[in-house]
Image (cartoon, rainbow, N blue to C red):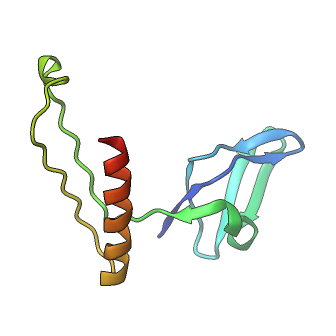
Amino acid sequence: MNKFILLDDIFILDKKVLSKDSLIEFTKDEQLFVETDLGQIKFSKDLLQDKIKMVKEDIQVSISVIDEDEEYQIKNWRLQLDFKASKRKVQEIETYLRKTLQDML
């Protein structure tokens, strides 16, 4: 089953029933059931299509904790990212990362 992340909060009658950045998973018939104070609410995948984004499960991120005394030392660091994509998409990501990292450094 594919997992999705919500891009916006979902409100029913001014009550938040689903929070932004929540991970959701639809049933086989593309339905999502949510228990609320108002009872069970059913959402279809089509209804939420503008408010969800598929989570890419083949991306792995590992974070290493550095010693506190080393936190402010400037050193050479290596950042590695492994993922599956087309060559065109890799070039787009590389361009974005180069620009973003240059602005951050």
Give the quarter of the image for residue 15: top right
Residue 84 as seen in the image, left or right of residue 13: left
Determine whether 59 is above or below 40 in the image: below
- Give the x, y percent position of residue 45: 68, 70
Tell me if residue 76 comes above or below residue 29 in the rendering.
Answer: above
Residue 1: % across, % down: 47, 70
Q: Residue at x 18, y 56 (%)?
A: 80
- In the rendered image, residue 87, in percent from the top left (x then y), is placed at 30, 82
Between 26 and 7, which is closer to the camera in this rendering? 7
40 to the left or right of 62? right
Front in this rendered view, residue 62 or 100:
100
Q: Between 86 and 92, which is closer to the camera in this rendering? A: 92
Task: Give the side of residue 15 with respect to residue 82, left or right.
Answer: right
Q: Residue at x 84, y 42 (%)?
A: 38
Rendered location of residue 83, percent (x, y): 27, 68
Q: Quadrant of the C terminus?
A: top left
Question: Measuring 23% from the left and 41% from the top, which residue is drawn there?
Answer: 63
